[in-house]
């Protein structure tokens, strides 16, 4: 067993996030485990750019109010206790509502041995789709 002490939070890169986003790495499995878990904290109005995950992603909202959207679909509000499952390769974004903080756990798997990357592919920033913009 290993008890890992809290590490400093990491700011989200401006290439991939709009607004103030910080994350904490919760788990990063050693191979053959491909486990990835981050707690991601979004300030009001902050959100990711469009992106997709090679092996999909599961989000679990633990605090606040957020928004999520898949390409070509409506923006959906997400609340504490909600779990969002994004299939492999589906373009989407996630973040806080304009007026509230939001924290979610982000859970995904790294690339399998021999699987072509990238683990997460980033696209353009969210513009017209974000409420009030
Ligand atoms: Mn995602």
Image (cartoon, helix red, strand yellow):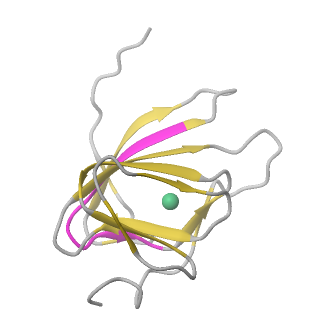
Query: Residue 42 in magenta?
Result: yes
> Can you say whether 128 is above or below 101 in the image?
below
Q: Name the foreground residue: 5 vs 82.
A: 82
Q: Name the foreground residue: 65 vs 42.
A: 65
Query: Residue 65 in magenta?
Result: no
In which quadrant is the N terminus drawn? top left
Q: Residue at x 66, y 27 (%)?
A: 31
Toward the left, the furthest residue is 99
Q: Residue at x 36, y 60 (%)?
A: 12
Residue 102: give x, y in percent of width and height: 25, 58
Q: Quadrant of residue 76?
A: bottom left
Q: Is residue 56 left or right of residue 116?
A: left
Toward the right, the furthest residue is 114
Residue 40: give x, y in percent of width and height: 34, 51
- Magenta stretch, overall SS: strand
Q: Residue at x 55, y 51 (%)?
A: 57
Q: Is residue 66 left or right of residue 119?
A: left
Q: Name the foreground residue: 53 vs 4.
A: 53
> Can you say whether 45 is above or below 12 in the image?
below
Q: Is residue 129 left or right of residue 108?
A: left
- Count up the numbered dots: 0
Magenta range is 36-49
Residue 112: give x, y in percent of width and height: 75, 41
In which quadrant is the C terminus drawn? bottom left
> Can you say whether 130 is above or below 12 in the image?
below
Residue 61: give x, y in percent of width and height: 33, 50
> Can you say whether 9 is above or below 51 in the image?
above
């Amino acid at each position: 067993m290993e008890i890992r002490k809290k590490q400093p939070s990491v700011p989200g890169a401006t290439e991939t996030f709009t607004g103030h986003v910080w994350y904490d790495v919760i788990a990063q499995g050693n191979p053959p485990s491909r486990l990835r878990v981050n707690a991601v904290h979004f300030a009001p109005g902050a959100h990711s750019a469009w992106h997709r995950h090679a092996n999909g992603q599961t989000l679990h909202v633990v605090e606040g109010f957020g928004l999520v959207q898949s390409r070509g679909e409506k923006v959906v509000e997400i609340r504490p206790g909600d779990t969002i499952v994004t299939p492999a390769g589906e373009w989407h974004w996630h973040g806080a509502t304009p007026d509230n903080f939001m924290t979610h756990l982000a859970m995904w798997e790294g690339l399998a041995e021999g699987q072509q990357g990238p683990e997460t592919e980033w696209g353009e920033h969210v513009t017209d789709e974000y409420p009030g913009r």
